[in-house]
Amino acid sequence: MPSDHQIQTILPKSLSPGDNIGIIAPASPFDKNKFLKGIAVLESIGFKTVFSQKIFEAHEFLAGSDPHRAHLLNSMFADPSIKAIWCARGGYGSLRILPLIDYNIVSSNPKVFIGCSDISAILNIFLSKCGLVTFHGPMIESLGYANKQTIQALNDILLTDQPLTLKSENKFVISSGTASGVVAGGNLTTLCHLTGTPFSPNLKKKILLIEDVGEAPYRIDRMLTQMKLAGSFRQIAGVILGLFKNCGESDQIYRIVDDAFSDFHIPVLAGFNIGHDEPNLTVPIGIKARIDTDKGCLSYLESPFRT
């Protein structure tokens, strides 16, 4: 795989009320009632939703076979009437379809692409292989239960073209400083499982976002240690921590992260409302931002959309 700096950044076009949003399920099956509540939220914002009835297929712990899930993704990118693509749920399965995605179709038809959790694999591979800027944000299945801050954050980023500044509402400085770099990352478990594969993200000069849910502290430590030993963090610019829900005491997680990154002498800032809880703020993956631990913020330096 080419390194990121060899690939030109591709910005999607910004959205407007009335645009068609295509819904796909690249990973696990989902609850249909929760799904429909999430669809209602998108439609209340003013978007139209488009999805195949085949999205409801299930095969073991997956939302249909690998070719089926990849086909739905490729088809949404190829359809000129679809202006954005939103994932129904994470869970597990995105890694399995990475070899089946048509990256030429994705590059030729850049669109807003939104997901989190297991979908972090797709967010980062779109950056690495296509240069496409994507969005780490809430799934359709959780949108029906999202609080006002989550919904407002969606509106603020998707329906404007201004650069985003994100405050750490529960600010905790693990390592002080400032740094600039392209934001990458997402769910730590998913990123760790990409390590050693042809799809492992290039984090050189990146600001790494990590979050997780339901992982014991020793497992957080093991994943960070594995990635560190594999060289994943070499020349990393900085780290921001989202939510680590049901992962033990925050102070222990922060000590583990401090130990993992102390050798790099980079800014590490915790306390962002990003991940598996409410609010879950939407943030761009693939454009430059600046982390400032004194101000407790991550400030994007450009709009995620093309004019």
Image: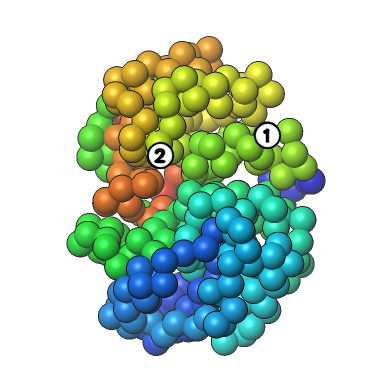
Which residue, as the protein is rendered here, is positioned at the far front?
60
Q: How many marks?
A: 2
* Position above or below: 218 against 26: above
Does residue 48 show up? yes
* Position above or below: 101 against 294: below
Residue to which mark 1 is pinned: 195
Residues at circles 1 and 2 in contact by the CB criterion of under 8 Å? no
Please state the horizontal and vertical placement of residue 34, each as a whole percent of the image: 35, 68
Residue to which mark 2 is pinned: 213
Q: In this rendered view, identify the residue nearer to me: 94 or 7.
A: 94
Amino acid on which disc 1 is placed: Thr
Please state the horizontal and vertical placement of residue 170, each as a whole percent of the image: 23, 35
Residues packed near mark 1 inside 10 Å, few (<14), some (14 to 19) or many (20 plus): some
Does residue 134 show up? no
Amino acid on which disc 2 is placed: Val
- Whichever of labels 1 and 2 marks the residue nearer the N terminus, that label is 1
